[in-house]
Amino acid sequence: MYCDTPSLLNKQGYVVDGGEGAWFDVYISLDGGSEISDSNGRFEYYQDPVIYELNPALGPQTGNTIVTVNGTGFDQNTTCGTYIRLGLIEITPMNITNETLTFKTPHSAFPGTAAVSFTLNGQQYSKQPAVSDLPKELTFDYYEAPYTTFYYPTKGPSNGANFQRHQGFGFMLGRPHLNDRMWARMVNPEKGTNLTEDIEISSDNLHIDEWTWYMPSVSGASESLIQITLNQQQWHDVTNVDTGKSYTYYAAPHVTSITPAFGHVKTSKDQVIEVGGTGFACYDEDCADLMCRFGNDEDSYIYVRATLSNAQLIRCKVP
């Protein structure tokens, strides 16, 4: 048999004292209350759990995002049927304390926003399974994994600082209730260890179909893997579809001498300088990427194609 539990709230919305605590003994009558059963059970009330925030509050459709929920009232006595719900999907929490719980998101067939709710008895949830007012609801957002179609350059010096542009889709979600953020890092492709710290991409350089950054420095020449994430937990590889590689760091060249080091402002266009140093090399077949740069700031830079003599000497014409 089934019966509804009476409310402990009075007309003013305050909790009515239920005897020694928030519980009632439950008896059964088959004749309208004239005769009551000898044995009884006990029904206990609990305080409504409250969810404050989720971290992270978004993840890819593939699932497996480990979400930490902060709030209160998650671990109360005599409760059973504890579930977290994303929309209509019920999930059993992994770990629970009174103020935190964690759960792993399941796979979702579609990207979108789901309201988050919680129950201690498997019936009554803290929120309705529909998103009505996004800014006021606690939600979890599924997204399609971002993908890259083109990026350049694919190699650079180990001291970093060269500008790189990425094109593709899904770098931002563009949902009004979310604050879009993205991080990037460099990883050893064989060991999976980090070569750099997680670097947040500036909002000025982040768009739904493009993002840019200045390459971070690493300790030396190496093959590296670029990874990006929207939730600082699940990382997505960025690779060149033609080579299967991601990014090549070469040993940063060092200039030790320029001969001649000065000349007339109206010098001949055939004036050639010799640049001495270490680490000079070509990384393409026709050496088209080897350049000398003249100038003191970005607005006045002049690039001139250089000629490689050896690893310690290059030549270029004075502009």
Image (cartoon, rainbow, N blue to C red):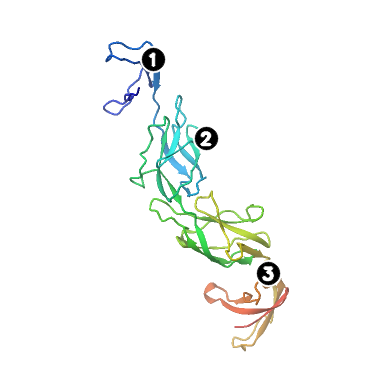
The vertical placement of 75 against 43, above or below, is below
Residue 254 figure quarter = bottom right
Task: Report x, y in % for residue 68.
Answer: 49, 41
Label 3: state its secondary structure.
loop
- Find residue 156 and report its horizontal and vertical position in percent: 62, 66
Q: Amino acid at mark 2?
A: Asn
Q: What x and y, as percent, mark residue 227?
A: 57, 56
Query: Looking at the picture, which amino acid does disc 3 mark?
Result: Pro
Secondary structure under badge 2? strand
Give the class, few, some or many, for how many residues have Cα within 10 Å of label 2's Cα (few <14, many ≥20).
Answer: few
Q: Nearer the viewer, residue 54 or 121?
A: 121
Q: Secondary structure at mark 1?
A: loop
> Which amino acid lies under the numbered mark 1 shown in the image of this protein?
Asn
- What label does residue 40 carry, if any? 1
The residue wearing badge 2 is 95
The residue beneath circle 3 is 253
